[in-house]
Amino acid sequence: MDRPGPGRASGFGQTRCLALTGSEGAVGRCREFSRQALQSWHWLPADDEERQAVAEDVLLMVSELVTNACLHAPGGPRELRLNWNGARLRVEVADASPEPPRLRPYADPGRPGGHGLRVVDRLAEAWGALPEGEGKLVWLEVPSPLDSPTYSPPDLPPDSASGRGAGPG
């Protein structure tokens, strides 16, 4: 489902939202949804290896945030939001748990689990969590890999774009 978010700020911005119910298949659906958004915003296909790496990093971080919501929040993730303002991309995952994510001490690299937020911490320009309703919103931001600071994405249909800003964070 691709729908506009509520208006919070004026100015340029395109937001895509995917409503989620339950954890089953959520990671794959969110990756594909994110891939389609990156394609429509011309992040993909990438012109060079560096841009390709940035897009792949975004998809990996989406997977990590959604996986954490699947593992730690009752009912799994509620919504994935992607907001691109031309200069940076903000990824948000809402869930029903009020507990903020914790960056664990370095885990044994040979054992599974406990590495997701370390990946996000290394790859994102910034990340954090905010209360949202009875739960929380975990967010991350990455700068645009596109060269021009004045580049603007193609127009999207009215039902898939909004002027919603990134909010606090």
Image (cartoon, grey):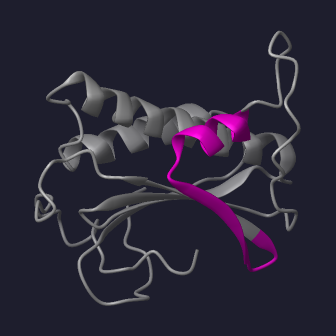
Residue at 46% x, 33% y: name it.
Answer: 57
Q: Measured from the top left, where is residue 104 in percent x and y? A: 86, 41
Residue at 23% x, 77% y: name it.
Answer: 12
Tell me if residue 26 can be seen. no
In the picture, measured across the screen, residue 160 lies left or right of residue 164, that is left
Residue at 65% x, 45% y: name it.
Answer: 65
Q: Check the picture and name the quadrant holding the N terminus.
A: bottom left
Quarter of the image holding residue 148?
bottom left
Task: Inspect the magenta stretch and tell me whether residue 3 lies in it.
Answer: no
Task: Between residue 25 and residue 149, name the one nearer to us.
Answer: 149
Q: Measured from the top left, where is residue 22 in percent x and y? A: 72, 47
Q: Check the picture and name the quadrant holding the C terminus.
A: bottom right
As drawn, the residue found furthest toward the top would be 110
In the rendered view, tell whether residue 44 sits above or below residue 133.
above
Q: Measured from the top left, where is residue 63 in percent x and y? A: 59, 36
In the rendered view, tell whether residue 118 sits above or below residue 139.
above
Task: Inspect the magenta stretch and tell me whether residue 126 lies in it.
Answer: yes
Residue at 74% x, 68% y: name it.
Answer: 136
Which portion, as a residue range, is magenta?
Answer: 116-135
In the picture, measured across the screen, residue 109 lies left or right of residue 160, that is right
Tell me if residue 112 can be seen. yes
In the rendered view, tell whether residue 144 sits above or below residue 87.
above
In the picture, measured across the screen, residue 32 lies left or right of residue 114, that is left
Number of numbered discs on residues: 0
Q: Measured from the top left, where is residue 146 in percent x and y? A: 19, 47
